[in-house]
Image (cartoon, helix red, strand yellow):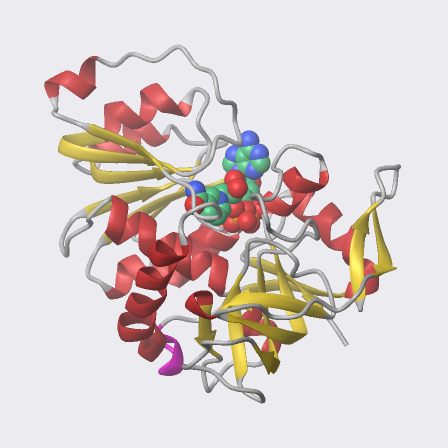
Amino acid sequence: MKAVEVAGDSVPLKIGSREIPAPKLGQVLIEVCAAGVNRADILQRNGKYPPPIGASDILGLEVSGIIIETGENVSAFKEGDKVMALLEGGGYASHVIANEACILPMPVNTDYVQAASLPEALFTAWSNLFTYADMQRGETLLFHGGTSGIGVIALQMANRFGIKSIATAGSRKKCDFLEILGVENAINYKEQDFVEIVKGLGGADVVIDMVGGDYWSKNLKVLKEEGRLISMAMMGGAKAEVNFVPLLINNLCVKGTTLRNKPLAFKKKIRDELIEYIMPMIESGDIRPVIDTVFELNDVQKAHNLMETSEHIGKIVLKID
Ligand SMILES: NC(=O)c1ccc[n+]([C@@H]2O[C@H](COP(=O)([O-])OP(=O)(O)OC[C@H]3O[C@@H](n4cnc5c(N)ncnc54)[C@H](OP(=O)(O)O)[C@@H]3O)[C@@H](O)[C@H]2O)c1
């Protein structure tokens, strides 16, 4: 099969060839039509985010495609089914193994490119908003990295569940897009002080943060009483000097989250909740995939280069023939 290999020189990503893997118990083999690109792929390419033990060492956390073989004990899917899948790795390839517990049927009104853009964002957004932060209708969310691949789905979900959203992004163009997406207050953090604005709006019940660094103290400052800070990444740095006083005064809760290394049972529960609550919204067009750029697999390096500029809005996707 065709697969992207990390070569490690000035053009780190190249197309290579591997054996097609065989599905084991509870797994399926997917002929891949498209693969989503995630920021984590860049960390893995740079040796900073190794795949979990037993997972493919090939990059790629999500795909869409057609099931061409099923392993033992697969009951909900069969050969020929069009699906999208969350992976522990292996998506940048013409074929990939997926666990049945992490597969969703392809929504009727999406194409393969759109479907490939969804699994990582759907699982991450749902688990962070509702499993970890326990967000309730009428509460206020502050989401940093609003136009990230994860953000564009999380903010639509929040909106559909009656949550008021505030989001930060790094340009006016990105903020304009967020307002079209339904975000009530989009803050260009390069020109505006988000602490002042969020406090002026009455504060946030939940902050979902992917920046870390000097955002730790600022996030604690904007939370209301009983507020929750969810740290899902630390792109701005893992170390900081933090003023924790608001944690005590406002009875705050801080939680860190990851998805990739969670047990299959956790992912299956999220998958089942997505099928029940979110798939109908995707099929009705109430939640839409947001695609910035599509690249052919041969141009995978260009896809990573674009992600590293952070100029994209929504997802970057690889088309795989
Ligand atoms: N915990 C979990 O379960 C989980 C699951 C999936 C992803 N993640 C993490 O969530 C983050 C978003 O992933 P993604 O694939 O959606 O990323 P993405 O599409 O590349 O978006 C990331 C955005 O974050 C903003 N940003 C803010 N500070 C940044 C910094 N210091 N360096 C780079 N970008 C910065 C940038 O937009 P602006 O220019 O607007 O600032 C950038 O476009 C990643 O860190 C990823 O590892 C966590």
Q: Residue at x 40, y 51 (%)?
A: 263
User: Looking at the rendering, which quadrant does residue 52 occupy?
Assistant: top right
Residue 254 to residue 297: above or below: above
Q: Toward the viewer: 149 or 132?
A: 132
Magenta stretch: dominant SS? loop
User: Looking at the rendering, which quadrant does residue 292 occupy?
Assistant: bottom right
Determine whether, in the image, residue 84 is placed left or right of residue 265: right
Residue 203 visible in the displayed image: no
Q: Toward the viewer: 27 or 272?
A: 27
The residue sitting at the bottom extreme is 80
**Residue stretch in magenta:** 282-286
Residue 147 to residue 98: above or below: above
Estimate the x, y position of residue 17 in percent, counting from the top left.
85, 62
Estimate the x, y position of residue 101 in percent, counting from the top left.
42, 67
Q: Toward the viewer: 165 or 21?
A: 21
Instruction: Name the quarter where the N terminus is drawn.
Output: bottom right
Residue 242 visible in the displayed image: yes
Q: Residue at x 37, y 54 (%)?
A: 125
Is 12 covered by the magenta stretch?
no
User: Looking at the rendering, which quadrant does residue 245 occupy?
Assistant: top left
Q: Residue at x 38, y 28 (%)?
A: 193
| Marker count (numbered) | 0
Q: Residue at x 36, y 63 (%)?
A: 268
